[in-house]
Each structure stands twice: as C-alpha cells, then as structure tokens.
C-alpha cells in the first residue's frame, strides 16, 4: 500500500472523529459554555452547513492546484478550525469554528478520492479509495467512543485539540508521502463539463437514493433496538460498535470486489440490503436476530461506498474529476437528510418503529432500479469512443506508475 494512502486514511479518521464526537460530548460542551444541550445540538447542523458549503466551493478553488497542494491546504483549514473550537470562549465562537472546520470535509474526501486512485494501478482504484474511507469508519469504532470517554473524564476541549493534532499528522504525511505527480492542475471549465454527462447524474442518483436507505434506519437505530428489540440502553453502545466494525469490513470488501464487478456489485448490494431490511423489520422484536441483521445490513451498505465514489469519477471523463467527486460527498449528505426525513415522517404518522425499516427497504429497492439504469448507461457509453477519456486513461497510467512506491 502506498504510504500516501495511510496519510489520507489518517485524515479521514480525524474528519470522522471531529464530525461525530460532538454527539457524545453534548452535555460536557453545554456545561462548559453555560448553554442548553439543545443549543449545543445545533452544532451538528452547523457542521452539516459547512460541509454543504465547503465541498463545491473549496474544490472549485483548488482545481488550479495539484491534489497534494489542495489536500494540504484543506488540512490546514481543518487544523485551524479544530484549534479555534478547542479554544472557543463562547458558544457563538464555537459555532463559527465548527463551520470553518466542516468546510474541509467534503472537499477532502472528493479530492482525496481522485488522488487515491492515481496512487495505484487502474484496476485497484476502488480498493485505494476504500483504504482512504476506512479511516472514516474507524472513527466511529475508535475515535468517537474514545473521544467521548476523554471528554467525560477530562475536557471536551482536549478532544477537539487532539483532532487538530491528527490534522497536523496528516499534513506531515501528505507532505512526505504524497507524490507531486499524483495529479496535476486542471481548470474549472473542464470540471464543470463533467456535469453534462448523464452517467454522472445517474451515479449521484444511486448515492442519494440508495444510501438514503442506510440513514432511514441508522438515524433511529437506538429507539428501534430499545423499543422493538427490548434491549436495555446499556446494550446500544456495544451493538453500535459491532455495527461500526461491520461497516469497516464492508468498506474494505467493497474496495476489493468493486474493482472487479463495478456497478454490478452495487446492484447486488442494494438488493441484498433490501432483503436484509425486510428480515430486520420482521424479526426486530427478537434481539439476537435483530442485531445480526442490523450489523449485516451495515456491512453490505457501506461496501457500496467506495464503488460509487470511484464510478462517479470514471463517469466524469475529464482530467481531474475532483468536483464530481466532491459532489458525490454532497450526495451522501442529501441521502442522510432524505433518509432521516422520510423516517421521521412515518414515525410522526404513528406507524411505529418498524416503519423506518420498511422505508429503508423501499429506498434500497429504488436505488437498485436507479443503479440498473446506470449500469445500462455505462455499457452504452463504453461502446462510444471518447477522445477525452482515452487521454485521461493514458495520463492516469503514467501518473500511477510514477506515484506507486
């Protein structure tokens, strides 16, 4: 594995930790700043706003630089944002610092995915992206629980300061290990031209609809396990840890299988996800079966992540592809909002906690349908020679050969 992938994974770990650890530190932050827990909860929304604003904006600003330069710059923003968050004297200052921190999120994963796939031979592109993204899943397994514990025992400020240190480690790794030839400057016009391609929108559609199935269930997993499964609150954390381990395994497996099967793997994964959710809905009141099916669902769902991230860059057929890659990160956030909103809708209608699971199953089936159309479009496009794509392929082979160490 090229060492530059390790630096990208460390960065993903830091971003994942700083995003989600606030959820576990709400009481401590509220006490420290003298505000309500509900007010601190708005920090989660503030971070999401930062991600949505930063993904296209910073990626567009970074197209004139190499991926290495852009990634280091994004990590500088991340470090400054976390440092300011750790030192924030007031609630308002902390909100602003969290938005600043979030600006780097979507762009880092978008640009990082482009850089990662050029560090390896073309037939291992999805695997390279999965190795970067596994840092995000490990954040939920290790970083968030550890950060929550540290905040409870010492200070939430120390946790955010530690995230800044992780950013510094990432900068050092990128500076030392990321080859300058892992990418080259492009231009905004070329990047925007990718959005004229129908296949780009098809893959973004797969992300928005297919992954909404995940968030429709995961957003309400705690009450589902306690109200339906009969688990005590003390068991929720271990189950979520198992879920996190499953997502890590799924991400790595998706990287390996995605390179071989591409969108066909996503079609099968979404279909299996729908079947697992049907089984979960029917057995949710049986604790053992519910836990097994939930973890299996998380494993399968996350396996598709690296594949769609790689495929949207392929679909762009432009030199670079960072902007569509970042757009796919935005699509994940749309999926998050869509899944959570639909789950909230059926709960508000009084349909009970099995309803979000059924919503997830329907969304997975809808995602399967969209992916089948995307697969057909991909095959149709493959029969049409594209001079730009040929040039990109040649360039990627040259840069990959130079980048691999």
Image (cartoon, rainbow, N blue to C red):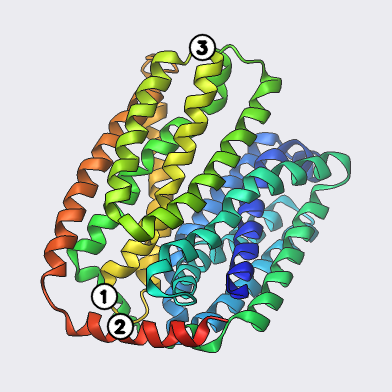
Does dot 3 land on a helix, a strand or a loop? loop
Q: Are marks 1 and 2 in contact (CB under 8 Å)?
A: yes
Disc with the residue nearer the chain's start (1 vs 3): 3
Q: CA distance from mark 1 to mark 2?
A: 7 Å
Quarter assignment of residue 89: bottom right
Q: Are marks 1 and 3 in contact (CB under 8 Å)?
A: no
Q: Is residue 176 above or below residue 76?
A: below
Q: Nearer the viewer, mark 1 or mark 3?
A: 3
Residue at 21% in and 62% down: 199
Which residue, given by chain and number where applicable, does mark 2 sit on? 392
Does dot 2 land on a helix, a strand or a loop? helix
Which residue, given by chain and number where applicable, does mark 3 sit on? 286
Q: CA distance from mark 1 to mark 3?
A: 48 Å
Residue at 49% in and 58% down: 130
Q: Which label is found at residue 317?
A: 1
Quarter assignment of residue 336: top left
Residue at 40% in and 88% down: 398
Circle 3 Cα neighbour tier, 10 Å, few/some/many (<14 / 14–19 / ≥20)? some
Quarter assignment of residue 276: top left
Residue at 63% in and 77% down: 174
Q: Are marks 2 and 3 in contact (CB under 8 Å)?
A: no
Q: CA distance from mark 2 to mark 3?
A: 52 Å
């Amino acid at each position: 594995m090229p060492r530059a992938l390790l630096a990208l994974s460390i960065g993903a770990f830091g971003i994942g930790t700083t995003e989600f650890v606030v959820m576990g530190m709400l009481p401590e932050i509220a006490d420290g700043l003298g505000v309500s827990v509900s007010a601190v909860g708005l920090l989660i929304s503030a971070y999401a706003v930062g991600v949505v604003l930063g993904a296209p904006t910073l990626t567009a600003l970074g197209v004139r630089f190499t991926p290495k330069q852009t990634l280091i710059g994004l990590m500088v923003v991340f470090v400054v944002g976390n440092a300011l968050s750790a030192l924030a004297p007031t609630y308002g200052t902390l909100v602003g610092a969290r938005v600043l921190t979030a600006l780097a999120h979507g762009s880092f994963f978008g640009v990082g995915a482009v850089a990662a796939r050029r560090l390896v031979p073309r037939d291992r592109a999805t695997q390279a992206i999965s190795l970067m993204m596994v840092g995000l899943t490990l954040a939920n397994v290790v970083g968030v629980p550890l950060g929550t514990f540290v905040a409870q025992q010492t200070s939430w400020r120390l946790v955010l300061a530690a995230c800044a240190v992780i950013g510094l480690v990432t900068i050092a790794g990128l500076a030392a290990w990321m080859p300058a030839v892992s990418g080259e400057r492009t231009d905004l016009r070329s990047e925007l031209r990718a959005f004229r391609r129908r296949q780009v929108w098809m893959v973004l559609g797969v992300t928005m609809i297919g992954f909404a199935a995940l968030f429709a269930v995961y957003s309400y997993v705690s009450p589902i396990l306690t109200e339906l499964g009969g688990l005590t609150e003390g068991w929720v954390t271990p189950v979520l840890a198992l879920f996190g381990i499953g997502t890590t395994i799924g991400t790595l497996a998706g990287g390996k299988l995605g390179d071989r099967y591409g969108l066909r793997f996503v079609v099968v994964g979404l279909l299996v996800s729908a079947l697992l959710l049907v089984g979960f809905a029917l057995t949710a009141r049986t604790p053992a079966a519910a836990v097994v099916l939930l973890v299996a669902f998380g494993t399968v769902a996350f396996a598709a992540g690296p594949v769609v991230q790689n495929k949207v860059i392929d679909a762009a057929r432009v030199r670079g592809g960072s902007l569509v890659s970042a757009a796919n990160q935005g699509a994940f956030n749309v999926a998050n909002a869509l899944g959570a909103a639909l789950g909230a809708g059926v709960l508000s209608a009084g349909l009970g906690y099995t309803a979000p699971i059924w919503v997830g199953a329907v969304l997975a089936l809808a995602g399967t349908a969209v992916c089948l159309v995307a697969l057909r479009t991909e095959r149709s496009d493959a029969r049409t020679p594209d001079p730009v794509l040929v040039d990109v392929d040649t360039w990627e082979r040259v840069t990959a050969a130079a980048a691999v160490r």
